[in-house]
Image: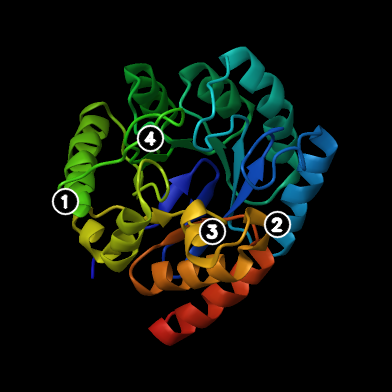
C-alpha cells in the first residue's frame, strides 16, 4: 500500500490517514438529482454549512450540470452562479472549498475568491488550466471522461476500461507535473462515459489506480448505475450510494464525493474501522 503524504490546500492541510468525505453543492437549476434545490445563494450557503456539520471534509461547488446530455454554459453564466457562493463559503466555512469547473476563467475567479482546489472533469484538457493551477499551487482533481457530458453516454466503448483509464491518468499526471502542478488527485469518473458494466469493473479494480501514487477520489452518489441495478430514481438511491461508498473505501478510495453527507459519513466510519483506520 502506498503511503500518501498530507496535501496542502491553501491554508488547510488534508491528511489521508482516514477516508475523506467531499460534499456536493450543486448551484444549478438542472443537476440530475438535486437541480434547483440550492440554486439560491443563501440556500446554497446554508446547505454547505449543514454538510460540514454532518462531517464533510471538503465542499465541492459546481455551477454547471454535467448530467448525461447536458449542454455547456458560458463562463459568465457559470460565474454568476458560483462566485457569490464561493466568496461566502471562503469566509464562513472551516474546510477547504473545491470549485468544480473545467473553465480556466471560472477557476481563476474562484481561486481568487478563496477556493482551495480545482475539480476538473475534463482532466486538464485546457492548457490554460494547467498554467493557472500551477501558478496558484493548489491541488487539482483529474477526472477521466470518455467524450463530453453532451455525448458521453451515447456509445461508451473500451477494449479494457481499467487499462485505458490508467493510460489516461499516466498521460495527464505527466502533463500536470511537467506544467508545474505538484498536487494531483485522480478520479476514474464513475458514470462519465461508462456503461453499467464499466462502472462495476472500476469498483472491483480500484486498487489498480494506486500505482500512480495519487489520492483516489470516487463519486458514486445517486448515479445512474445504481438506478439501473435497483430500478430507483435519484432521490431513492441512498442505500445504493452507501453500498457503493463502502465498496470504494474498502477497495482503496481516499476521498468519496457524495450528496448525502450524514448517512455516508456513518458508513465510512464503519468501513474505516474494519480497515483498521480511525
State if disc 2 and disc 1 touch (CB < 8 Å).
no
Q: Is residue 159 left or right of residue 230?
A: left
**Residue positioned most to the front:** 231
Residue at 45 percent of width and 59 percent of height: 255
> How far apart in space, not on screen, are marks 1 and 3 (Cα)?
24 Å
The residue positioned farthest toward the right in the image shown:
42
* Closer mark to the observer between disc 1 and disc 2: 1
Between the C-alphas of marks 3 and 2, the distance is: 24 Å
Answer few, some or many: residues within 10 Å of disc 3's Cα (few below 14, many 20 plus, some between 14 and 19). some
Quadrant hosting residue 57: bottom right
Compare residues 103 and 158 and report the one nearer the observer. Answer: 158
In the visual, does 237 lie left or right of 275?
A: right
Closer to the eye: label 3 or 2: 3
Q: Residue shown at 68%/51% (left/top)?
A: 94
- Give the labeled residue for mark 4: 154
Q: Which residue is mark 3?
A: 227
Discs 4/1, front? 4
Q: For marks 4 and 2, give the CA distance.
A: 34 Å
Q: Are marks 4 and 1 in contact (CB under 8 Å)?
A: no
Q: Residues within 10 Å of mark 2 (few under 14, many from 20)?
A: many
Quadrant of the rendered structure where residue 198 is? Answer: bottom left
Q: Which residue is denoted by mark 1 in the rendering?
A: 160
Q: Read off the residue under disc 2.
A: 51
Amino acid at each position: 500500500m502506498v503511503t500518501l503524504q498530507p496535501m496542502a490546500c491553501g491554508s488547510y492541510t488534508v491528511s489521508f490517514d482516514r477516508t475523506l468525505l467531499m460534499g456536493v453543492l450543486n448551484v444549478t437549476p438542472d443537476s440530475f438529482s438535486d437541480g434547483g434545490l440550492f440554486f439560491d445563494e443563501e440556500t446554497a450557503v446554508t446547505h454547505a454549512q449543514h454538510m460540514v456539520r454532518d462531517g464533510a471534509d471538503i465542499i465541492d461547488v459546481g455551477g454547471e450540470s454535467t448530467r448525461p446530455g447536458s449542454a455547456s454554459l458560458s463562463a459568465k453564466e457559470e460565474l454568476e452562479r458560483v462566485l457569490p457562493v464561493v466568496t461566502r463559503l471562503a469566509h464562513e466555512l472551516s474546510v477547504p472549498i473545491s470549485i468544480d469547473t473545467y473553465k480556466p476563467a471560472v477557476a481563476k475567479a474562484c481561486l481568487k475568491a478563496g477556493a482551495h482546489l480545482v475539480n476538473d472533469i475534463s482532466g486538464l484538457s485546457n492548457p490554460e488550466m494547467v498554467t493557472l493551477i500551477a501558478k496558484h499551487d493548489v491541488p487539482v482533481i483529474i477526472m477521466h471522461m470518455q467524450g463530453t457530458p453532451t455525448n458521453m453516454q451515447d456509445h461508451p466503448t473500451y477494449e479494457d476500461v481499467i487499462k485505458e483509464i490508467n493510460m489516461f491518468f499516466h498521460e495527464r499526471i505527466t502533463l500536470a507535473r511537467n506544467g508545474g502542478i505538484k498536487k494531483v488527485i485522480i478520479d476514474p469518473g464513475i458514470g462519465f462515459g461508462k456503461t453499467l458494466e464499466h462502472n462495476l469493473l472500476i469498483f472491483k479494480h480500484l486498487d489498480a489506480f494506486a500505482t500512480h501514487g495519487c489520492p483516489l477520489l470516487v463519486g458514486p452518489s445517486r448515479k445512474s448505475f445504481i438506478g439501473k441495478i435497483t430500478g430507483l430514481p435519484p432521490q431513492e438511491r441512498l442505500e445504493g450510494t452507501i453500498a457503493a461508498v463502502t465498496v470504494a473505501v474498502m477497495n482503496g478510495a481516499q476521498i468519496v464525493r457524495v450528496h448525502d453527507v450524514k448517512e455516508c459519513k456513518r458508513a465510512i466510519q464503519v468501513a474505516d474501522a474494519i480497515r483498521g483506520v480511525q
